[in-house]
Image (spheres, rainbow, N blue to C red):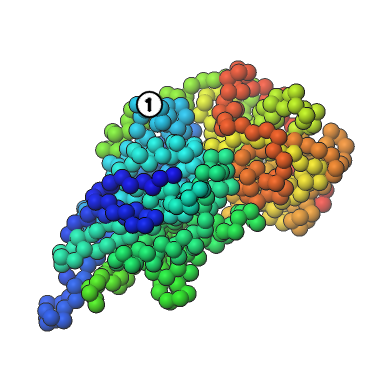
Amino acid sequence: MPLNRRNFLGSTAVTGAGVALAGTVGAGSAEAAGAAEPAARRKKRYSFTVMGTTDLHGNALNWDYFTDAEFDDKAHNDVGLAKISTLVNKVRAEKGRHNTLLIDAGDTIQGTQLSYYYARVDPITRAHGPVHPMARAMNAIGYDAAALGNHEFNYGIPTLRKFEEQCHFPILGANALDAKTLRPAFPPYVIKKVHTPHGRDVRVAILGLTNPGIAIWDKANVQGKMVFPGLEEQAAKWVPKLRSMGADVVIVAAHAGASGTSSYGDQLPYIENSAALVAEQVPGIDAILVGHAHTEIPEYRVANKKTGKQVVLSEPLKWGQRLTLFDFALVWDRGRWQVESVSAKVLNSNTVAEDPKITGLLRDQHRKVVTYVNQVIGTSSAAMSAAEAAYKDTPVIDFINHVQAETVKAALAGTAYASLPVVSQASCFSRTAGIPAGKVTIREVAGLYPFENTLEARLLTGAQLRAYLEFSAHYYVQTPAGAPVDPAKLTNAESIPDFNYDAVSGLSYEIDIAKAPGSRIVNLSFDGKPLVDSAQFVLAVNNYRASGGGNFPHVARAKQVWANSEEIRNTIIAWVKAKGAIDVGTFASVDWKLTRDGVPVF
């Protein structure tokens, strides 16, 4: 894919495989040297601030489209770019607009019904289509750059390219390479010139890095088109180039967490959450805006192994709940600006009101989406809740599995695999999701499946399914028989998110949480008989899991016998529309349960 060489906020300079986009930031702080110091010895000093967001996930406004109400959680966080805009305005007013930059670390265009609507219902890719609301808001706020996130690829490259075209700032991805040429498919970096009152500009380089897991998670959209090498490898290539080009400050916007962990297993030779490793291994970086992990890190310092220099990392909480502030203090020394100190902190968006400029700008698009998600598409014979789905076999997860299994069975009719039994996996994506008794709307069904996953069918044996279930059962904390059970402490949700625990329908089994992980699945049966290891099954599975997400065994290498490009969420919505009614009694059953030494936990 050709490099993006459009002009953003100033002159454009092309250097080798990269694109340096030089913008202008105006006059800054006054000298800090004391008046009594001789002028000849007085050092020139300057300070500026870089603000950062990450993992916005389609949250433009402080609104929850699944509950059709203002967003709220237990901590009373707020979300959205309209809140971020107010914080940004406050910082700019305090420090001077021209002494600030604003960047993002990725995952922007997926996650809410607002972002879904403008990707699928009224897509930005159609002729004379709308401007994406996230592009509208970010342009109005005045972002200087954003890194690619892995979820940018969920709707396919054409949608991403259209979003990129609509943004008035560069979308950076130094390790998103064209599969044929191995040249950057997006601008790797941008260099912003910050004007100071001393007549000596500060050249601030922003390097964008994204997650190699895109090659697994969005294989269908990127295979043969783009490749995604490791962050450390590409940072080691680009940071010295940026320094040689005269960058006084180097900031990395990295869509990778700081923990050093990975969900790839042996599928990729890279680390998923490698931001701290980049700081540790690559000299020349001053600060890293961290993304991807959905955790809050106000300030985290990592010593570079080669130089000993402290690199400052910060990750603001997801969805626009926090805004990171990197404060840089510079001194003019030996003919150039040197970074004297860096500090970081986060601001909470629940401390401010939404910016009426942003809410007004998006009012019409927001109303369209609210009307769309509140359409009644059927009825349900009973209420179904996901509140206990993390530790009990609940009808709401049975419903997802029922639709998936029916869809796969219909797709395999008349094929060589039509006679094989179909089992299905599903996870609890949101414990607050549910379907009411009576009328059911799009937003209520969509709330069961907030991710853009698609459906596949993979061929597995009985033995492989047993291993799959054992792996899934790592989710539970080992709990001795007879000990008190607190559902809030029953799972390893802090290290294993709910979406990486799978319940499999079509089988009957118990999970003995008194036993050590790896030996917990007992009384595993199919059709009333013990499961035969050599028996063949078709697993209805989402593309994230099928492509290796969560590192479950066997499934990524299993034979694919069918795949669909439609989101599972849409498949469920279409199923409800076609049936007109959800008869809970036809699919709800307790096929798995937690036990301790054979005694049910609940």
Q: For the view shown, which residue lies furthest in the front direction?
A: 181
Residue at left offset 82%, top offset 52%? 597
Badge 1 local density, few (<14 within 10 Å), some, or many (20+)? few
* In-front residue for pair 355/536: 536
Of helix, strand and loop, which one carries label 1? loop
Q: Amino acid at mark 1?
A: Ala
Residue at left offset 49%, top offset 59%? 231
Asked if 325 appears above or below 398 in the picture, the reply is below
Which residue position holds label 1? 127
Q: Position of residue 572 (x, y in %)?
A: 60, 28
- Position of 477 compared to 158: left or right? right
- Position of 68 compared to 472: left or right? left
Residue 75 visible somewhere in the drawing: no
Residue at left offset 27%, top offset 68%? 329
Residue at left offset 61%, top offset 23%? 575
- Position of 366 compared to 514: left or right? left
* In-front residue for pair 12/533: 12
- Position of 413 compared to 566: left or right? right
Asked if 259 appears above or below 77 in the picture, the reply is below
Residue 23 visible somewhere in the drawing: yes
Q: Toward which corner of the image does residue 400 lie, by quadrant?
A: top right
Q: Position of residue 521 (x, y in %)?
A: 79, 48
Asked if 310 appears above or below 254 in the picture, the reply is below
Of the 4 image quadrants, the one containing the N terminus is top left
* In-front residue for pair 572/585: 572
Q: Position of residue 274 (x, y in %)?
A: 51, 60
